[in-house]
Amino acid sequence: MTAWTLLIIAGLTVSGFLVGRMRAQGLRNAAAGALHSMPSYHGLLLASMGFGASAIATLAVSLSAGSQSIVMPAAAAILGTAAIAGVYPLITPKFRARNIFEQIVKMVLLASSGIAIVTTIGIVFSVLLETLVFFGEISPIEFLFGTHWAPTATPASFGILPLLAGTLLITFIAIVVAGPLGLFSAIYMAEYADRKTRGMLKPLLEILAGVPTVVLGFFAALTVAPLIRRSGEALGLSVASESALAAGLVMGMMIVPLISSLADDIINSVPQSLRDGSYALGATKSETIKRVVLPAALPGIVSAFMLAISRAVGETMIVVMAAGLAANLSINPLAAVTTITVQIATLLVGDQEFDSAKTLSAFALGFVLFCFTLVLNYIALRTVQKYREQYD
Amino acid sequence: MDATPQKLPSNPIPRILAEKETKIVARDVNVYYGDKHAIKHLSIDIPDRAVSAFIGPSGCGKSTFLRCINRMNDTIPSARVTGQILVDGKDIHDRDLDVVQLRARVGMVFQKPNPFPKSIFENIAYGPRIHGIAKSKADLEEIVVNSLKKAGLFEEVKDRLSHSGTSLSGGQQQRLCIARAIAVNPEIILMDEPCSALDPIASARIEELIDEIRQNYCIIIVTHSMQQAARVSQLTAFFHLGDLVEIGDTEDMFTAPKNKRTQDYITGRFG
Amino acid sequence: MTDFSKKLDPALVAKRYASERRFRAYGAVALAISVLFLVYLIVDIAVKAWPSFFEHHIVLKVELDPARIDPAQVQKGDFNGIIKDGLRAAFPNVTTRADSKKLMAQLSTGTGDDLRILTVANPAMIGTTVNASALLSDDADLYFKGMHAPTLKTPGQTNLQIAKDGENYLFTGDLSQLVAGQIVRANGGAFRITSMEPGGAKAEVLLTPDTLNSLVAGNWDILSFAAIEVDRRIDDRAVVLLEAMRDKGIVEKHFSWRFFSSGDSREPELAGLRGAITGSLLTVVMTLLLSLPLGIAAAIYLEEFAPKNNWTQFIEVNINNLAAVPSIIFGLLGLAVFIGFFGLPRSVPLVGGLVLALLVLPTIIIASRAALNAVPPSIKEAALGVGASHLQAIFHHVLPLAVPGILTGTILGVARALGETAPLLMIGMVAFIVDVPNGFRDAATVLPVQIYLWSDLPEIAFQSRTAAAIIVLLVVLFCLNAIAIYLRKRFERRW
């Protein structure tokens, strides 16, 4: 039925346009060019009426009766035709078809921009509702302060602390790797590299940024983790085959381009006059960078780090593939730890029923993750914005 | 065209150059920005312990030449400088002379005040710190206070040395920048239109300051304002389209310019 | 005349310059590490992937027996059986049930597929004897690719006698070359040395010999191994059979078109990417259909019509935040809203596209706004000046000039959607699906999820398949990025 309905909607749109334009052209020929709007605008108005009415009818029916019902194409056809027929008599030489059509277009544009808000509301509600149901079964205190995580055991326990510890451990390793690498890369690109070098290096970093995380996860699990285990064993250390270090290192490399491109922008927006002032006093380039440019860029760089942390905390595939499932409360980078995202993915992959505490706990974890990243993102974005305004 | 015009364009030699020691000697300096020939075969002598003013219409090359003297053009990738510039007889493009040492001796004040986004104290302490001039903390404090005093800013800011340099007014910021330059104890101070972003009262304060410190430094000021040049300088050089057109004692230049172009500019026929 | 170097302490200046060089080197090293990481990543995966683009076949003479193929239903013919008969015929000295089973195990479970396709296309072949190309199993394939513990071949340089010794055999003569555990191949058969005794070398038979003639130097050889049998994925008997195939010269290596033309499978040698590629394509089309119009419309509104008020501010904050929300959260949204609330089916490109559309929407809006903003206002004013309405000015003049920028942003958004995995796991596009999807409502998986699925499988051959799938994905993404960079360069305009 879906195909039929789509066909009917398309047919109504096209015929609405043709009918409207024909009528207006007829009027123009009769009234000798005294139309307010061009004929095609009359056509467009009727077309939008036909499209809008039939599309709304389709959506309404498919939500209430399902898309397999014969009612769907029928409702689309009837409502769409009615809308066209209703507006058709209004077409007169003085009819302001263009103004009305443009008003409709503006409404559509406005509605489109609202999608972002609808999405946010959708996220908040979908995650929040399930979380509230979850908190009906498990107390928030137990969830937030419990030190044991075993959602599939009997009796199940839902203490988020081991997951939080694992997430923060891997994030910490990632930032320790990505922070210096990203920052120094940015400094080199912004202050030292000539145009040609920059033109070569920037796409390379963009490629690194564009490598899908599932690829990095494969690399972490199959190449980096064994490498770390072997070198650890050579040093006489016991290394878990899914060590936090492997996941953290690769995640760090994933974040390098993010930090370097953000920091590059920020460093470039420090006014040249400050550098000139420092050079004129006889400072070397590195002294100028360390003592003038970086302090001036500090808020922006802190924001870049915050966005990087938010990215690392929310990253899923690398940890799903390279970090473990065991919820250990550990800060040993050579041990296996698990993260919030790993648990969400594990709990929700495969068949799941919506009312079990196990499934609901994934939404509660998602809620924690969303709140955590939201706060980081919000502060970081505000800081960057203020920083930009300062030098504009 | 003479490839190396060793002679100065003005004859006779300005009196101030005879009175004072010559600090800076430039011979056949050319500056290119990419394909643009910004300064053409420029030769000039600058006296020590006096104020020299560079005047001329926009784009005449006066700021460009100023930036050659402490090699600030090094920071512009497309800029290329040829010819000789001697400070105390030493070629500043010599391979064994490094730009850090040069700039420690040749301070600069820019068109727009550019205090660092640090405290007033840190702004001035920056130069002495990187050069290791102050031996102790007390030493550093003394340098800061003295520089502020020399720049005539101390009384206004002595209670808020820890406030941000950017919180000062425009005129105060510019004097802070002068104090910052003085703190490194330079011999030459280059000023690139230091008053163009300031109101008349703040400008007057800067001019007074220049007058007060000129006994101790070789000062070169680039200015758009002929009145300012007449008020503060002893030597004036007029630039036009990359050429040094005329150079002379300030009082002569403004009363009896020898060159037609100088005359036209001074009387406001172009510019 | 003052000395230049007197003013500053030369030792300090030297130290400062050293620090300057160090600092610069840190930057260069940081960049070098990032670039090396990228190179190592790609080379490592490419090396792992390379064998998967090829597959090994054996060429067998087979009879297309009409009794096993119904000419009316060629498709249903027992082609695997025909191939197996051909293989049996090629190895007449494999007689025991166990040996025969071992021999057949070297064939893929889909070994007759190629012959079936050929016969369906050309039914006249039925009843004739043809040379058929039969696909080998994953372990046999890996053996010929040299990805198992290596087998060493040493030519026999001494003369030996061989005699039957009850169930087993006994080698006598110059035994200097023999070591227990090695395999001696002679007279068309193969023997494993079990123990070296004073009376000779005891051996068990792996492949029945044609005769028991004495062995002359150069007429026989020894197979030895770097790893003992239990540590190898392929046992001695299989090695003997595969080496016999190689000696017969019937083993062929082909480019593996199958890797691109078939769907997923439990058998590594049969698993292909067609299903995943189709799924990716369907999902991305859905993503584009939704996010491109919405994104451009939102960008036009925000850039051209939105009043500067709190509401607009709120929308902008929202868009920027959404761009940084973890992708897995979008998966939760899709699961709860599209599947839980609207009741759409799981595992389908329709829902995948919906989720990814929401995910890339902020990217497209931000890029489109930047592109619209880069068009100078004078162009819009010129249109307004000749009496165009605001909307006409935008759609006729501003938007066309912004198209390259919007396109660049869209391509980067598509690249992001193509590589996204986590949200699709949430909405169930992670099932084992053999059939290639035909529409937006068919169960499907996508390329990155396929990579994730394969990476989890225990077979060694799947490791290489996974790497090969990654290479396919990376090539597509690099092409998209290259197009975006080209567009940006080509249409970069300075107003």
Image: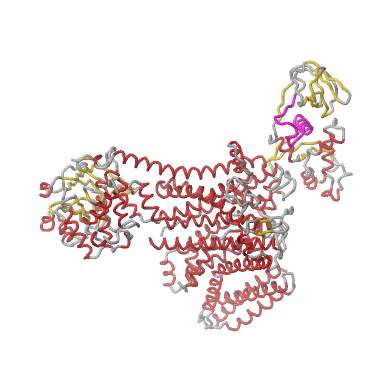
Report the colour scheme.
secondary structure
Is residue C231 located in the magenta-colored stretch of the structure?
Answer: yes
- Residue C481 shows in this picture: no
Is residue A37 located in the magenta-colored stretch of the structure?
Answer: no
Left or right of residue C408: residue B141: left
Q: Is residue C7 above or below residue C91?
A: below
Left or right of residue A120: residue C215: right
> Which quadrant of the rendered structure holds the C terminus of chain C?
bottom left
State the image coordinates of residue A79 (x, y, percent, origin top left).
67, 78
Q: Quadrant of residue A227?
A: top right
Count numbered badges in the picture. Answer: 0
> Which quadrant of the rendered structure holds the N terminus of chain C?
top left
Q: Is residue A325 above or below residue C55?
A: below
Q: Nearer the viewer, residue C213 or A90?
A: C213
The residue lying at 39 percent from left, 41 percent from top is C21
State the image coordinates of residue A259 (x, y, percent, origin top left).
49, 52
Q: Quadrant of residue C146?
A: top right
The residue lying at 24 percent from left, 60 percent from top is B195
- Residue C443 shows in this picture: yes
State the image coordinates of residue C2 (x, y, percent, origin top left).
20, 41
Chain part drawn in magenta: C222-248
Left or right of residue C313: residue C266: right
Q: Is residue A249 above or below residue C303?
A: above
State the image coordinates of residue A340 (x, y, percent, origin top left).
61, 56
